[in-house]
Amino acid sequence: SFILFQDQIIPREQGKVDIEDRGYQFGDGIYEAIPVYGGQMFLLDLHMKRLKRSANELRLQLPFNIDLLTEKLNKLIGLNRINDGIVYFQITRGSAPRQHFFPDQAGSILTGSVVSHDWRGNHDSGIETSLAEDIRWLRCDIKTLNLLGNVLAKQYAHEQGSQEAILHRGENVTEGASSNVFIVKNNHLITHPADHLILNGITRLFVLELAERLGITVDEQTFTLDDLFSADEVFITSTGNEVMPVVKIDGRTVADGKAGDVTSKLGEAFTGEVTQFIAS
Ligand code: PLP
């Protein structure tokens, strides 16, 4: 397979990063993961907008502009013959002798790869989840390479036989280890506001737009563990999961244990948009 290394597309085996790369030593970098449907990147502009925001927040220079980046990613998708998949890329602050403060001279390093993905997996049966305390830092809005809090939560969920961890700061639910969390109560959609405590998922943003179009009322407000357990429906969103029903939380069944009506409606609307996108 092929990868992107700066502006070059090279065989996977030839991608080598320096041991003093700040991404490797400090997690000093950012990333994006963009869904590919029918060989094309979906919701590209929103992903690139978030990339630029992440870079700005960390005062990190992109190695080249978004148009060239888009062109290279499209080439990567084509060369790897990806129809449905996810393109992943990251940008670090480059390589310099190890000191915490920013180096004077160290160009940023961009690497990217792309994987195939079997999209419509277990959307009907949903997933099981485990609760985990959200121990991450206070800038979860930045899509940085620092993912240890997420990794530990996901590992815990994995050991419990769950597919995702639902994170909470004390009583308040924030998001998933690699997804956003929504609850439905009396046909009303609730999700954590896009502040510094969550990553503002692109799928989250798109689902909020779909909800509005479908006339489903939305509240971007914090909700508690009690709200979570008394919800009519729970689902997560992410690039990899799209709209995914949650049927169990810490072994407790959500409502009747099946995907709820509002979740299904949003899932169908999402699939409809993707179908249209592929045809366009
Ligand atoms: N929240 C976290 C912590 C994530 O890592 C992700 C994606 O991986 C999301 C939310 C969902 O974001 P998106 O919908 O852009 O994939």
Image (cartoon, rainbow, N blue to C red):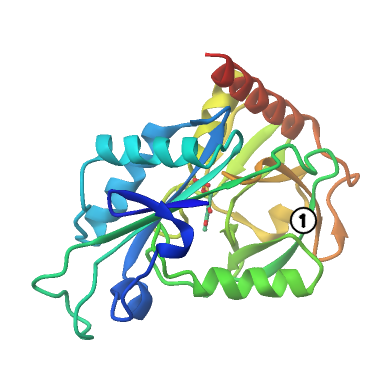
Q: The residue tagged with tag 1: helix, strand or loop?
A: helix
Residue 69 makes an appearance in the image: yes
Please determine whether, in this image, residue 202 is positioned above or below residue 96.
above
What residue appears at the point 83 percent right and 38 percent down from the top-left corner?
124
**Residue 224 falls in which quadrant of the image?**
bottom right
Occupied quadrant, residue 216: top right
Residue at 41%, 35% in the rendered image:
74
Q: Nearer the viewer, residue 217 or 22?
A: 22
Q: Residue 164 occupies which quadrant of the picture?
A: bottom right
Q: Nearer the viewer, residue 267 or 74?
A: 74
Q: Amino acid at mark 1?
A: Phe
Q: Identify residue for label 1.
A: 229
Across and down, in percent, residue 234 comes to 73, 46
Q: Is residue 34 left or right of residue 56?
A: right
Q: Is residue 215 visible?
A: no
Q: Position of residue 61 (x, y in %)?
A: 19, 56
